[in-house]
Amino acid sequence: ETGVTQTPRHLVMGMTNKKSLKCEQHLGHNAMYWYKQSAKKPLELMFVYNFKEQTENNSVPSRFSPECPNSSHLFLHLHTLQPEDSALYLCASSHGRQGASETQYFGPGTRLLVL
Amino acid sequence: GENVEQHPSTLSVQEGDSAVIKCTYSDSASNYFPWYKQELGKGPQLIIDIRSNVGEKKDQRIAVTLNKTAKHFSLHITETQPEDSAVYFCAPLASSASKIIFGSGTRLSIRP
């Protein structure tokens, strides 16, 4: 166990659905991240929250909407997704003091399939 | 921005032999060089890292070597075992960077 949990682990949704992915970290960290991992591409950073403030949005389409209500929880709200959004969505956390030069602690991911 | 290349993309070695994976980067300001291991059904986990003031670091069967002049660093796994089968990622980083760029990954398979 890494101290980062993600739910659900698997999700199938239609293009018109709205769903949310949840991430929780039990490590006392202050930075949280969403990554997308596709079969054909490297790990792609999507969003960064540092001390609950969004500090990075890596040109992610607006159909992905992050929410960070506190330092321990991170959500990714999904609506009107496309089949090409099917991927493994990974959440990670880090201490948040040194910026990006920090070890990332990853959750197990949510495997998303968009039909 | 940082350009990261990782080679090879796949590697198959006999159990007990050594494996080497190389990561090349472009940002000369990079000063943190981690390697992550991703097993099936799990997220990546840090296995070893090195900072730019050190040329080599070892932790039992794994080691990382850094060549800052040539802008590359390598992961070395000796006496490979079946549990080493996984995908390995590098993620070189400058302290001023706002985001992390991961390498494309190396799928390592250990043949019994």
Image (cartoon, rainbow, N blue to C red):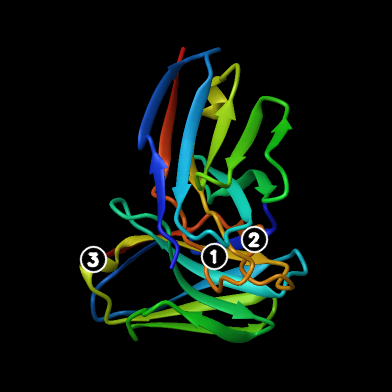
On screen, residue A88 above or below A46: above
Q: Disc 1 versus disc 3: distance between alpha carbons?
A: 19 Å
Q: Report if the CB atoms under discs 1 and 3 are less than 8 Å apart.
A: no
On screen, residue A9 above or below A72: above
Left or right placement of residue A29 versus residue B46 in this view = right
The chain identifier of the residue carrying mark 3 reads A
Left or right placement of residue A26 versus residue A78 in this view = right
Residues indicated by labels 2 and 3 sit on the same polypeptide chain: yes
Mark 1 highlights which residue? A91
Q: Report if the CB atoms under discs 1 and 2 are less than 8 Å apart.
A: yes
- Indicate which disc, 2 or 3, sits on the residue closer to the N terminus: 2
Q: Disc 2 versus disc 3: distance between alpha carbons?
A: 26 Å
- Amino acid carrying label 3: it is Glu
Q: Residue at x 63, y 55 (%)?
A: B32
Q: Residue furthest front?
A: B69
Mark 3 highlights which residue? A84
The chain identifier of the residue carrying mark 1 reads A
Mark 2 highlights which residue? A4
Q: Is residue B36 visible?
A: yes
Residue B81 spot, x, y in % from top left: 57, 20
Residue B1 spot, x, y in % from top left: 43, 68
Q: Is residue B40 visible?
A: no
Callout 3: 10 Å neighbours few (<14), some, many (20+)? few
Q: Disc 1 versus disc 2: distance between alpha carbons?
A: 8 Å
Q: Residue at x 64, y 76 (%)?
A: A73
- Amino acid carrying label 2: it is Val
Left or right placement of residue A112 versus residue B80 in this view = left
- In front of the other: B109 or B51: B51
